[in-house]
Image: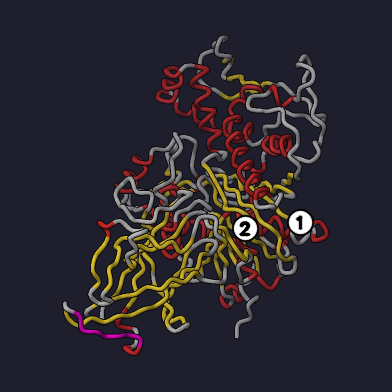
Amino acid sequence: MVRPTDKIVCGIDFGTTFSGFAYCYAASGKDPENVHVIKAWPGGRNLTSDKVPTQMIYAEDGTISKWGYNIEPTDKPLRCIKLLLDHRQAFPSYVSKQELLQLLKEHRKSPTTAVADYLTQILEFAKKDMSEKFSEAMLSTTPVEYVLTVPAVWSDMAKQSTMKAAGAAGLGDKVHLISEPEAAAVHALSAIQKEDLRVGDVFIVCDAGGGTVDLITYEVQSLEPLILREVVPGTGGLCGAAFLNYGFEDYLKSRLGFNFCEGIIEHRPKCWSTAIEYFESYIKRNFDPIDEKGNFEEREFSIPFPGVADDEKKRIDCGFLTVTSSEVAGVFRKIIDQIMELIDDQAEKSKAANKSPKGLILVGGFGQSRYLFKRIKSKYGVSPDPPVTMPPGAPKGKSVFSILPGFKDQSAAGFLVIQPPTAWTAVVRGAVLRGISGRDLVSSRKARRHYGLRLNVRFDPAKHPLSARYWDDYDEVYRAKDQMVWLVQKGDTLLSDDPIQQDVCVVVQSMTGSNETKLYYCGADQAPAQFSGGSASEVLPLCSVSVNLGGISPRFWTTKETPSGKKHCLTYKLGMLVQSGRITFDVRIGGVVYDTVQAKFE
């Protein structure tokens, strides 16, 4: 018999802009320090990085010719392929969704197969890395489990597509999904010294990544083992670090002139890509205009702008473009303000639930930013450290943050702001810890939307319109068609190990074949009672659940003669279990799980 700890757990953080891979032999224990993160990637030029760019180029035969760090600045790779898995996701300005889909079509690839191709490259390299850490005998005899992370705002169809891509990439059938902020929370709270963590402590986890920023608030229920529960429904938005690049490009076009910049992009593409790459690698990642004493430090950055003529007005000299700290702070402003709004929302809802946050844990690639950390700490931190003072000549009586773009002079909101040293890899490390535990580390979650069934219910003239009424000749009663029966209300507490159950009654002329039940969701605060359909409807299809009627014993059926012929009736319970990364379904008859059922998400 294989021991639960006799396995290798691999975590994959497949990101919009960067992806990471980590692994650990489960018997090594749950210490976060034992998780190995791959840092040396192909094409990295002997430099190490916790992650690899999520980009690739197809050859004419449909194979991948380049990926990750092997992509040159002048190449035109496929980027943001992850966003294609969820049709609701907005694309950044520098990537055309239509052009990306067209390129995939030319290579006879679907979004799912493209993601599978990229994951295959990561997996093949990771196997080589693991072969250097583990013996051949160990790798050939030890089971390998994979935990794949997905955004908290991902649709269920996108999660199903992710699972399909994982299967096509060769990850096998032992794949678990976990939401990115949940994985980050598991790692961050596991890494906190137990003497600094108490049952009942409430933390906001802010996972600021390349594309998305996700926030979830957790309460610590148990320390040994670590068990968390969601306090309020999580939120998220497209305000990750990649949008700083787009904002910087917009700033350059505004300052230098749109036509001037478009001319450079068209005639000197390497010049433009060099400037953006320099901003990405040397300015954005290290930007922090507040010195150790809390003073705003105005400085100049010289960005390579090769081949462009000197222009004193545009501040271009000897192939370099000059920008100031204040100008870069302006680029950061809109993005950080959006993140602040998300934090405000979580903090206010937590307090309304009588669960005031003790702290905020900042993780993710963008979560490494000292500038973002100080911005958040200046507003929410219980004690400014270091003390913030004004630059020379600034108005008296105001904070330095009040005169910088986007800063507001506000008093501390009263909770700790924590930036772990492993912020960028918190998600992938947490995925590994989830796999090692072998169980769900979050005992309950808050529903982000309403979930329900479209059913025909007994007609009630006080509730239902006359237009919905029809005669049911089996039960000989009037029923109301197309009524929504909501199994889950937005904000409900969903237990990780306790399925929601709903009676489903099937009346058919044959006990063979299958019965398809459609589930729906609604994101509005108040869900409608009746299904209206149409493009303007707030009630949208979630998935179809198909039950094999022929596999259910005749003893559970009742038969009756009706005016329209002999009919058979079956009543069963549809079980729905909402977990971190997916929703699963089963059929229950007589209190026993009769069968698991497959759902086709829409």
The residue lying toward the viewer, choosing from 65 and 471, is 471
Residue at the image point whose x is 39% and y is 78% from the top: 572
Q: Position of residue 105 (x, y in %)?
A: 30, 48
Which of the two labelled residues, at mark 2 and mark 1, occupies the earlier sequence position? 1
**236 to 194, vertically: above or below:** above
Q: Residue placed farthest to the left in the image? A: 564
Magenta range is 556-562
Task: Check disc 1: other Cα within 10 Å, few if <14, some if 14-19, many if 20+.
Answer: few
Amino acid type at mark 2: Glu
Q: How many marks?
A: 2
| Residue 45 found in image quarter | top right
- Tell whether position 531 is magenta: no
Name the dominant secondary structure of the magenta segment.
strand
For residue 192, which numbered disc appears in the image?
1
The residue lying toward the viewer, choosing from 97 and 515, is 515
Residue at the image point whose x is 79% and y is 41% from the top: 382
| Residue 336 seen anywhere in this rendered image of the structure | yes
Going by the image, does 239 lie left or right of 553?
Answer: right
Q: Which residue is mark 2?
A: 230
| Residue 117 seen anywhere in this rendered image of the structure | no
Element type at marker 1? loop
**85 to 435, vertically: above or below:** above
Q: Position of residue 563 (x, y in %)?
A: 16, 78
